[in-house]
Amino acid sequence: MPLADHFDGQHFHNPGRVRHSGMGAILRWSLTRRRTPWPHWVQDPPQPPPPDTVAAGHAALTFIGHSTFLIRLPLPGGKVFTLITDPVFSQRCSPLRHFGPKRARAPGLALDALPRIDAVLVSHNHYDHMDLASLQALHARFAAPVITTLGNAALLAQAGIPGAQELDWWGQARIGPITVTATPACHFSARGVLDRDRTLWAGFMVRADAGQVLFAGDSGAGPHWAAIRARLGPPGLALLPIGAYAPRHIMQPVHMNPAEAVQARESLGVPRAIGMHFGTFQLTDEGIDDPVRDLAAARDAAGLLREAFDVLRFGETRELPLAGGGH
């Protein structure tokens, strides 16, 4: 891969060379952490299935859990283009079958209830975002093209998912009428202890005739939000992470808290944001409902209406206008 301001020939780096916590700090935290207890299981009420059609100028979002969404965009003739983001349907997000973070609630939409998938977006290689079992099941059923970031195609091919298209930041892929642009994020990558930052992390701007939707992947705060707006224009809708933020001395470089997510929304110039990356797997120390409560407080402090930055119920589908963005 060519040298770049975010790649030194061996490792990738964050915008502005923001450094994330080292293994020593993470080990000390893991030995002394004080987690707010989560419920063993949350039973969410059933939601209606996603509709077969989407109104012109809108996007239909279905929140499956954590960072997994269906994004459905209208096409001419009443057709719909459907993407799925960072699909995780497994019981654990872990390299080990019986250990590691366990799901606290069922996926809001079961894997076998999915509509036809036209494209799969994989933002980076962490187990709570790149779940090989889920990707294998999707490939077997739909064989949809996979868009991911630099360095991940080989692992996917080894898992029986060939042909994934890798993107560098600002790189583009065209899938029929849809253009996907990889956008910078402030995060890191690893599947084990020896491969830290050997592959890239990103978000994705999805552009269609209806407008633009930003799936931000996993990210801390930083100047990249303003850079995305300057280069691609403001999206009409953004999916922004709001969870896995405690303790701040460990998580701040790589995970926004809700107040920072509200600031990211402002920097992006996006009229409507939806929160994600919460309430599914206990990865960090905050309580299961803290991200939603903290988002409400941050929204109120910023003087925003709820519709400006909201969350969906697990399994809920909401059709939202894309007006207000630009590209």
Image (cartoon, rainbow, N blue to C red):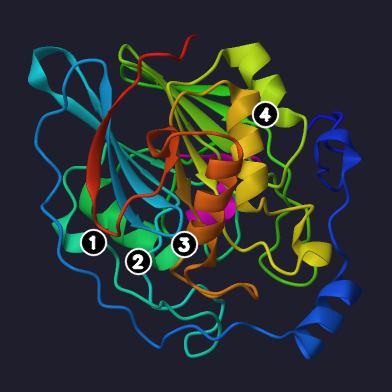
Q: Helix, strand or loop at disc 2?
A: loop
C-beta proximity under 8 Å, tags 4 and 3: no
Q: Nearer the viewer, residue 65 or 42?
A: 42
The residue type indicated by label 4 comes to Trp
The residue type indicated by label 3 comes to Ala
Q: Which residue is mark 4?
A: 225
Residue 89's tag is: 2
The residue type indicated by label 1 comes to Leu
Q: Would residue 7 be found to the left or right of residue 141 on screen?
A: right
Closer to viewer: mark 4 or mark 1: 4
The residue type indicated by label 2 comes to Phe
Q: Earlier in the sequence, mark 4 or mark 1?
A: 1
Residue at x 68%, y 54% (from the top left corner):
255
Closer to viewer: mark 3 or mark 2: 2
Residue at x 16%, y 22% (from the top left corner):
55
Label 1 CA crowd tier, 10 Å (few <14, some 14–19, many 20+) = some
Residue 119 image point, x, y percent? 34, 37
Label 2 CA crowd tier, 10 Å (few <14, some 14–19, many 20+) = many
C-alpha span from label 2 to label 4: 29 Å
Residue 171 visible to an observer of this rendering: yes
Residue 305 image point, x, y percent? 43, 34
C-alpha span from label 3 to label 2: 16 Å
Q: Which region is colored magenta?
A: 147-158
Q: Earlier in the sequence, mark 3 or mark 1?
A: 1
Q: Would residue 41 be found to the left or right of residue 57 on screen?
A: right
Indicate yes or no whether the magenta region holds residue 148: yes
Q: Which residue is mark 3?
A: 159
Closer to viewer: mark 2 or mark 4: 4
Q: Earlier in the sequence, mark 4 or mark 3?
A: 3
